[in-house]
Amino acid sequence: EESKAKDAIASAQREGLSAFGDGRVFLEKYLDHAKHIEVQIFVDASGKVFHLGERECSVQRRHQKVVEEAPSELLSTELREKILKSAVAIAKAGQYRGAGTVEFLVQDGEFYFLEMNTRLQVEHPVTELTMGIDLVKAQILTAQDMIVNWEQEALKPRGHAIECRLYAEDAYANGVPSIGKIEAIQWPYGPGRRFDYGVEPGDEVTPFYDSMIAKVIVWDETRVRAIEKMKET
């Protein structure tokens, strides 16, 4: 209601003025069924801007991503080109260098800028597997003022990759960290599988850090095959 909106805006203005010395507020369009689409960009030492396709990151809980995949099945060719072009323009405008992610919300054929993450993100392996590149290596080269020797026209996604984050949480207690000693870990072997982790048997899961302890990433020729492989993994 209009009266409630006026009260809420006045309250936000008072809080902003008190906390930051600035009472300005802005209104955002409400998106009730948006999807989270992000674009991996990279700018090398020469200032050349590359886009490395998009990732679909809509499966989330408590505003944290749980499942990510590349490429997105949601986007039409036309919408994909618009989003990729926008991400490149943002990187150029900011005179960015290195790996970064430009994030968007997509709904009803329209897309809206959300934020830019100026770092390598947790979900970067799905981009590496579908694009055939090593983003960490590219960052190291760029830090040494070396170029990456990529050509944008050759950077095309191949197949489909899915990443699932593994959290040490109790699903029956509203997701609180499940602390304790890790007794054993066994990763299944096979082609098109990748595991990123920083724990080993004997390690303790504590309540003091993020509860994500590992990532499982799979690649296959199609999305359906990648989903089946993830189920098996």
Image: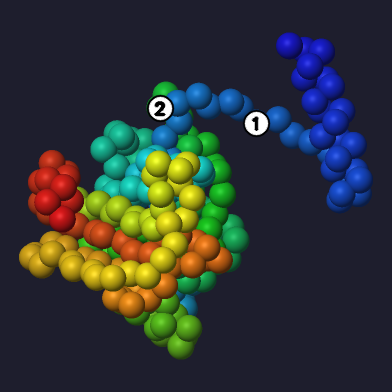
Q: Residue furthest bottom?
A: 144
Location of residue 78 by image quarter:
top left
Image x and y of residue 85, in percent: 43, 48
| Quadrant showing the C terminus | bottom left
Whichever of labels 1 and 2 marks the residue nearer the N terminus, that label is 1
Above/below status of 213 relative to 61: below
Residue position for label 2: 109
Report x, y in % for residue 75.
32, 36
- Residue labelled with disc 1: 28
Q: Is residue 40 visible?
A: no
Residue drawn 82% across the image and 34% down it = 12
Q: Secondary structure at mark 2?
A: loop
Q: Is residue 166 left or right of residue 115?
A: left
Left or right? Give the position of 34 relative to 74.
right
User: Which colour assignment does the render follow?
Assistant: rainbow
| Residue count near mark 2 (Cα–Cα under 10 Å), binned few <14, some 14–19, many ≥20 | few
Quarter of the figure with residue 2: top right
